[in-house]
Image (cartoon, grey):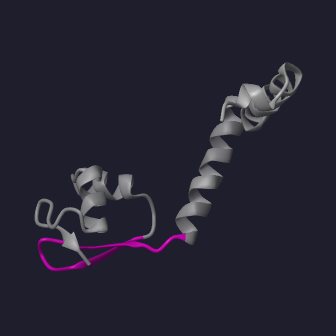
Amino acid sequence: MDTKSLWSDETRREVSEKMSSGISAALAKLTPEERSARAYKVAASRAANRDPYKFISPRGKLHLVRTSLKDFCTKHNLDRGNMSGVSSGRIEIHRGWTKG
């Protein structure tokens, strides 16, 4: 069913304004430094609440990644997309690294 037949022009305008003035409007009021600090807090909170990535290195050592997968991959010269695939089981092995 078409939404135009359900809502009047005024109602559509009100809904559109509410949708466009949500989170993005609140973030627009923040300085770039405040936005960066907020993003860091959100990322840290998400990382703290999720299970760690578990990988076995080519030498057989178990690595628990509790921080950023991006940082781990940069440190070990690995491709983040491939390591994400290893973690999910979509890819079996990447440069000798396997799922732990």
* Along the viewing direction, whichever of 13 and 40 lies nearer the viewer: 13
Q: Where 62 sits versus 84, above or below?
A: below
Picture coordinates of residue 25 (x, y %)? 77, 30
- Residue at 12% in and 75% down: 59
- Quarter of the figure that contains the N terminus: top right
52 magenta-colored = yes
Res. 2 image quadrant? top right
Picture coordinates of residue 7 (x, y %)? 81, 29
Point out the stretch of residues depicted in magenta: 50-65
- Residue at 62% in and 46% down: 39
* Along the viewing direction, whichever of 94 and 16 lies nearer the viewer: 16
- Quarter of the figure that contains the C terminus: bottom left
Picture coordinates of residue 35 (x, y %)? 68, 38
* Along the viewing direction, whichever of 98 and 18 lies nearer the viewer: 18
Res. 6 image quadrant? top right
- Residue at 73% in and 34% down: 27
Image side of residue 64 versus residue 77, left or right: right
Image side of residue 84 versus residue 93, left or right: right
